[in-house]
Amino acid sequence: MKRAQSPAIWASVAVGVLAGVGFATFDYAEGTSYLSTDPRACANCHIMQSQFDSWQKSSHHTAATCVECHLPTEFAAKYAAKLRNGWNHSRAFTLQDFPEPIAITPPNAEILHANCLRCHADVIHDLAAVAEEGAPRCVRCHASVGHGPRAGLGGPWRGAEERGVDADRPAAGENDAP
């Protein structure tokens, strides 16, 4: 007489397989490195190598790391942004549905701008005090300080026509007001 398999056994096997694949993927992607502030972690993904290389040659490489410009300073907000970006990057690179050259997203452009204002508050406080809502972002005029000139960071956006965007458009927040 054949005994019926318990659904609990199959559920346990499925959870075990998913957990094993998840842990293997996290290890392969060097997931723990993203919890650090080391700029080399940003270059774990091959698409970020040109950004890492250009940062090393930029005017800010001795003053600011990736985390200091691209993440909030508050603990909870910083790790919430790391979690959101990690998920978005993992999904985008797995599905290959990211713009090329890669572009900063509007929420991350907000973080970047806030960090420019925070670090340079002593220099720009008068300007920031009179700036209107929707005023140009710091990177409108200072686009090269973090990563140097855009040359070599990619060509026109891949798939721009089907996305209905300008193939030569700069990254979000780079040369336009929000």
Image: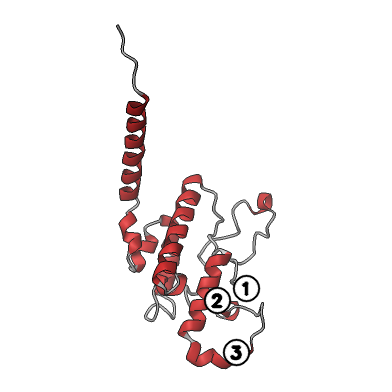
The Cα–Cα distance between marks 1 and 2, rounded to whole angstroms, is 8 Å
Q: Which mark is residue 53?
A: none
Colour setting: secondary structure
Could you tell me the amino acid type at mark 1? Asn
Circles 1, 2 touching at the beta carbon (< 8 Å)? yes
The Cα–Cα distance between marks 2 and 3, rounded to whole angstroms, is 22 Å
- Residue 92 falls left or right of residue 53: right
Q: Which mark is residue 143?
A: 2
Q: State the residue at coordinates (55%, 71%).
A: 110
Could you tell me the amino acid type at mark 3? Ala
Quadrant (top left, top right, bottom left, bottom right) of the C terminus: bottom right
The residue labelled by disc 3 is 129
Question: Helix or strand or loop: what does disc 2 sit on?
Answer: loop
Mark 3 surroundings: few (<14), some (14-19) or many (≥20) residues within 10 A: few
The residue labelled by disc 1 is 175
Q: State the residue at coordinates (31%, 44%).
A: 24
Seen in the picture, residue 13 relative to 24 is either above or below; the reply is above
**16 or 36, nearer to the observer:** 16
